[in-house]
Structure formats: structure tokens, C-alpha cells
């Protein structure tokens, strides 16, 4: 650049934060539509209830903290108490809180930290180890997108209008 200014390049975390923010828009729309009276509904006996799926999605967006600020998650040492929600608005507020925290963490993390290894384990058994960037991409972002697709099917089966995601849906002709 001329006049003494340097070109600023976004970090890996900032780039991922922008994508996460965009994906969160349609994920949030899905969560808002979950009917409270159907929280325990599931499409098949082997499926999880809709509220379990929705809580998993809302939790996953909060995994940025564990991924960026810790070297591993050891299931043998983790103590997780499931959150309870009485309606979709409480669930969405929890999702929004986790999103805000994730965006803050990603906006300030260095590229060097994003490339450091992270492990998922249960005691001595290591399930995987990969760079934090890959964990954020696969175990957080892609995982959320996968379960959001499941949630779209749940909503369709409950005859709840499915929001547009990457383009119009049968219920929302956006664009």
C-alpha cells in the first residue's frame, strides 16, 4: 500500500469468526422455531428428542472456549451438568451467549495458537489430536451444520416452517 499504510490480513480466528457468525444466523432461526410443547418429541425411537438435539447444537457453539483455551478435553475429567430450558427463547439466549463468547475468543486468537495441537480423550484413550483450527472447523462448525440439518428434518416432520439456510426453503422464499 502507498502512503505508509500496511495491508491488514485477517487471522485464521477472525476468518472463522466471520463464518461462524454467518452460520449462526440460520442456526438461530431453527432454534427459535422449536415448539416448547414438543421438546420431548423424536422422529424415531433411536433418535434423540428435539430438545436434546437443540441443546447439543447450542452447546457446540460454546466449544470454542475449550478448543482455543485448553489443550484437550478428557471425558474422564469433565463434569457436565445438562442445561434445562422451559421454552425456545431460553435456549436461544443460551445459544446467543455461547456465540458471543466464541466470537470474542476467535477474534483475538493468534494464528500460532490456532495451529497448536488439541486432543480429545477419555483417560489414556486418545480419540484424536489435530490443530485447533481443524478442531474448530470439523468438530465445531461442521458438526453444528450437520445437526442443524437434522433439526430441519425434525421441524419438517412436526410441520413447523423450515427457515431458509443457504437459499429458499419450501416455507421461506428469501432473496
Image (spheres, rainbow, N blue to C red):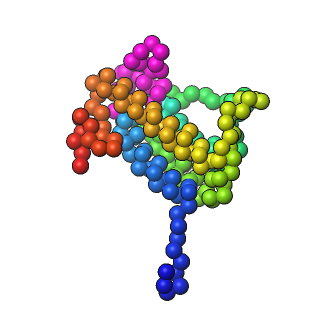
Region of the chain picked out in magenta, as a range: 33-54
The answer to which of 126 and 64 lies nearer the viewer is 126
Left or right position of 108 against 39: right
Left or right relative to 25: residue 82: right
Q: Is residue 99 above or below residue 46?
A: below
Question: Which of the 4 image quadrants contains residue 171?
Answer: top left
Q: Residue at x 68, y 51 (%)?
A: 116
Q: Position of residue 115 (x, y in %)?
A: 65, 53
Can you tell which quarter of the image residue 123 is in?
top right
Percent of width and height locating residue 24: 43, 45
Q: Could you tell me what secondary structure mostly forms the magenta stretch?
A: loop
Q: Pinpoint residue 75: horizontal percent, then vertical percent.
A: 69, 30
Task: Please tell me which residue is depicted at 45% across the width and 26% down the height of the picture.
Answer: 51
Give the residue furthest to the top. Answer: 45
Residue shown at 37%/25% (left/top)? Answer: 154
Residue 65 visible in the current orientation:
no
Instruction: Inspect this view and state whether residue 71 appears.
Output: yes
Tell me residue 36's x, y (percent).
37, 25
Specify the farthest residue to the bottom.
3
- Outermost residue on the right side: it is 124
- Residue 10 among those drawn in magenta: no
Amino acid at each position: 500500500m502507498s502512503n505508509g499504510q500496511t495491508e491488514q490480513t485477517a487471522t485464521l480466528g477472525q476468518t472463522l469468526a466471520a463464518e461462524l457468525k454467518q452460520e449462526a444466523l440460520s442456526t438461530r432461526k431453527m432454534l427459535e422455531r422449536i415448539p416448547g410443547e414438543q421438546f420431548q418429541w423424536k422422529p424415531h425411537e433411536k433418535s434423540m428428542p428435539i430438545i436434546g438435539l437443540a441443546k447439543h447444537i447450542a452447546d457446540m457453539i460454546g466449544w470454542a472456549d475449550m478448543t482455543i483455551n485448553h489443550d484437550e478435553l478428557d471425558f474422564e475429567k469433565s463434569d457436565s451438568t445438562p442445561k434445562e430450558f422451559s421454552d425456545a427463547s431460553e435456549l436461544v439466549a443460551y445459544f446467543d451467549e455461547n456465540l458471543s463468547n466464541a466470537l470474542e475468543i476467535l477474534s483475538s486468537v493468534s494464528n500460532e495458537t490456532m495451529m497448536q495441537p488439541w486432543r480429545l480423550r477419555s483417560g489414556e484413550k486418545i480419540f484424536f489430536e489435530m490443530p485447533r483450527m481443524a478442531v474448530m472447523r470439523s468438530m465445531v462448525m461442521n458438526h453444528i451444520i450437520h445437526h442443524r440439518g437434522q433439526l430441519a428434518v425434525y421441524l419438517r416432520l412436526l410441520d413447523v416452517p423450515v427457515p431458509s439456510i443457504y437459499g429458499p426453503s419450501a416455507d421461506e422464499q428469501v432473496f
